[in-house]
Amino acid sequence: MSNAYRGNQGLASGTNLPLSPTSSSPSSSSTTSMSTSGQGLGANQSFDPSMNSISGVVSHGPRPLRADGKPFRALVVDDESTLRTALFRVLDRQGLQVITAASKREAEGMMSPENPFDVALVDLKLPDGDGIDLMSKIRSQNPQCQVIILTGHASIEIAVRATQMGAFHFVTKPFNIEEIVSLVDKAASHKTLLQENQNLRSALHRRYRFENIIGQSDEIRRVLDMVERVADSESTVLVSGESGTGKELIAKAIHYNSARANRPFVPVNCGAIPAELLESELFGHVKGAFTGAIANRAGRFDLASGGTLFLDEIGELPLNLQVKLLRVLQERRFEPVGSVKTHEVDVRVIAATNVDLARAVQKGQFREDLFYRLNVIPMRLPALKERRSDIPILLRHFVDLYNQKEQQKPNRQRAPRQLAGFSAEAMDALMLYPWPGNIRELENLVERLAVLKGEGQIEVMDLPEQYRPQNMSLGASRMSESAGGPRDQMEAMGDFEGLPESGMDFNSAVDAYENALILRALEKTGWNRNQAATLLKLNRTTLVEKIKKKGLRPPPEAEA
C-alpha cells in the first residue's frame, strides 16, 4: 500500500521520519550520509534523519503564501527513498506543503484538479514509466505547475526534449541541495507571476465586456453592436470621435472580445512622440542606427506580435512614416531602422483620430491610399452632447466608483466618506452643459467633487462656476409641477442655452429630458416607483419598463 509524506503537519524540530514510506523510524543516533553515486546530494552534504536537517543547507526562510492563502504545494517523485526524504525535509523547512511518491502511478493518484501542485521535482527514470510523460500529465491538469526534472543519466537530447515539453529546469545527479532549494524558490516565484498575469488578463476580459461599457442611448448601442460584429474579424478599424469620447476603451473592447484577447494590446499615441523618434518607436532599431542607439530595440509592431496595435491620433503621423505604415498594412513586413533584415508581423491594427481624415486627405496632409487602407471598418463615437440621456448613468457610475475606492482604502483613521449623488437641480445643470471634454471631463468633474465635497449630496452650488446655469433660479423652478401648457413646460425646461447653429439631435434631447424627469421623480420619492409613477402621471408598469430600458439604477443607500 502506497504512502506519502505531507508537510506542514505540526512536526517539531527533531521529529524522526522514516527513510522510506515502508520502513520504520531509524534510531535517533543514526546518521546516514548520502552517496554521490546515483543519489541526489553532493559529497560535502550529509543528511541526519534524527535532526530533520541537512548540513550545509542555508534556509531561505518561509515562502509567502499563495494568493488563496495556502502554502505552495510541491510534489517530489523519485524511487530513491533516502533522496525523497531529504528533499521532503528541506522543502518542508522552506514553508512548502510537500508530498512525495515513489512511482509514476503513485504520483498520478495524488493529482487533483481541485488542489493542484505548484512545483514538482520528478525523476527521469521511474520504475513504472518516464518522468517526462508524468510531467506532461501534471502540466495538462495544471499548465502553471513548474516541473524540475532530476536524472542520473543526462544527455543533451533528453534535456532538449524535457525543455520542449515544458520543464522549468533540468538537473543532473549528483546535485547540490542548495541549488535545488534555489530552483524551487525561483519556480514558485515564476508560478506566482504566471498566476498574476492570468488574473490580470481575466480582469481585463471582464472589464472590457460589452455590458461593462456604460450607456443606454441609441447612439452608444449602435457603436457596441458594431464592436460586437467586428471583434472577431481581422479587418483594420478606424475609430473617430472627439477627444475624451472613449476611443481607446472601444479599441480595447474590440481586442479583448477577439481571438487575439490573450495576446498583447499595445497602444501608441502618434501625437505624443516626437516625429524623429516615432519611426524607431514603431519599427524598432538596431545598434548603431543613429546617435544614441547603443543596443538593438524592438518596436511596437514586434511587441504587439499576435495581438493588436492601437495607433491613437493617427492623423498626427508624419507623411514619411505614412508610406512605411502603408507597406506594413499591405505586406505585413517591415525593416527596423538601420537594418536590412525584414521582419514578418502578425498584428491587427486599430487606429483612432479626433480629426476629419477625409478633409486632411483633400488638404494633402494625409495619404489617400493609407486612409482607405485604415478605413476598412469606420466607427464614429458620438460626443457626450449627442448622447445626453447617458449623462445621469455616467455620473452615477463614477460616483459609485469613487465610493468603492473610498471603502477599500487601507489603514483608514475615519469612517469612509460616501457621495450620495446629485440633487435634481445639479443634475439639471449638468444635463444642459455642452461637455466639450466629453466623458473624460465628466469623470474628472466627479473626481474633483469627490475630493472637495467628500460626502453627502452634491448641490448646484457645489459645481464649479462654468457648470452652473446662468440663471440660478431657473434650476429651482424648472419642471415645476405647476407648469401647464406647452409654452410653460418649455420655459420650465430651459432653452438648452439656445439652439446651436449646427442644430441638435431632437431625439437625444427628448430622451435626455425624459431621463432627467424620471430621475428627479425617483429621487424625490426615495426610488419608490409607485409614488414616482403618480408624480409623473404614468402607469407604474410603463415607468418600470422605462427604468429598465434606460438602465437607471438607484444609489447604494436607496437599494439598501
Image (cartoon, rainbow, N blue to C red):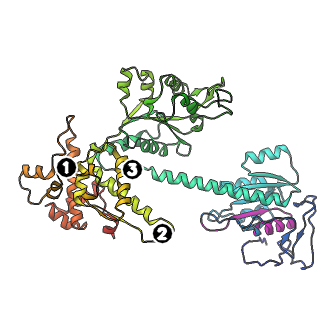
26 and 185: which is toward the camera: 185
The disc, 1 or 3, on the residue closer to the chain's N-terminal end is 3
Secondary structure type for disc 1: loop
Span shown in magenta: 68-92
Q: According to the image, label 1 marks what residue?
A: 470
**Residue 460, placed above or below residue 372:** below
Quarter of the image with the C terminus is bottom left
Labels 2, 3: front one:
2
> What amino acid is labelled 2 in the image?
Arg
Give the spatial CA distance, label 1 vs label 3. Answer: 33 Å
**Residue 225, placed above or below residue 174:** above
Residue 76 counted in the magenta span = yes
Image point 68% across, 57% down: which residue?
189
Q: According to the image, label 2 marks what residue?
A: 412
Q: How many C-alpha atoms fall within 10 Å of the one at disc 2: few (<14), some, or many (≥20)?
A: few
Give the spatial CA distance, label 1 vs label 2. Answer: 40 Å
534 and 464: which is toward the camera: 464
